[in-house]
Amino acid sequence: MTPPAGARGSSTEEWQPVCRVAELEVERGATALVHGQALAIFRTPDDRVYALGNHDPFSKTSVIARGIVGTRGGVPFVASPMHKHAFDLRSGRCLDDDHVSIPVYDVRIVEGVVLVGHRRVETGWV
């Protein structure tokens, strides 16, 4: 898939087209292989799209995309289907254990296409 015109200026290697936003079911995960990593992609009811690593650090399995999406105290999260640990969709931080997180990837929507960038580096918490 060729990146949409709005993605010009960023190399194809940086922003990988994944799918159209309309193809993502609301509050259901989808998986994608991006930059050699298995990702879980989520669309929330407000049409925001998030990309996280698909690997659950507690169960050591690739199941995050099959998790349950919700909100806790205004924080959008996905709960792993294995042990129900909740991960913030914005930061990847586990809401149940501050010492654990999963990778988060930058997302852009250009002309209705979801583009995923590289892993985001979070700062400000341990």
Image: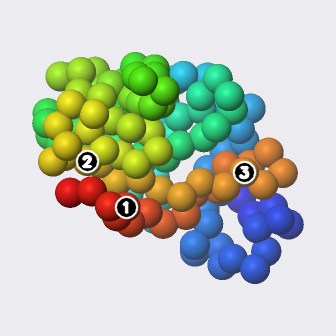
Query: What residue is at 54 percent from the left and 22 percent from the top?
Result: 27
Query: What residue is at 59 percent from the left and 28 percent from the top?
Result: 44
- Identify the image quadrant of residue 22: top right
Specify which label sits upstream in the sequence, 2 or 1.
Answer: 2
Expressed as whole percent of the image width and height from the top left, the position of residue 2 reads: 75, 64
Going by the image, does 28 lie left or right of 3?
left
The three-letter amino acid code for the residue at tag 3 is Ile
Q: Which residue is mark 1?
A: 122
Going by the image, does 72 lie left or right of 24?
left
Specify which label sits upstream in the sequence, 3 or 2.
Answer: 2
Specify which label sits upstream in the sequence, 3 or 1.
Answer: 3
The 10 Å Cα crowd at callout 2, few under 14, some 14 to 19, many 20 or more, is many
Expressed as whole percent of the image width and height from the top left, the position of residue 103 reads: 34, 54
For the residues labelled 3 and 1, the Cα–Cα distance comes to: 21 Å
The 10 Å Cα crowd at callout 1, few under 14, some 14 to 19, many 20 or more, is some
Mark number, residue 38: none
Mark number, residue 101: 2
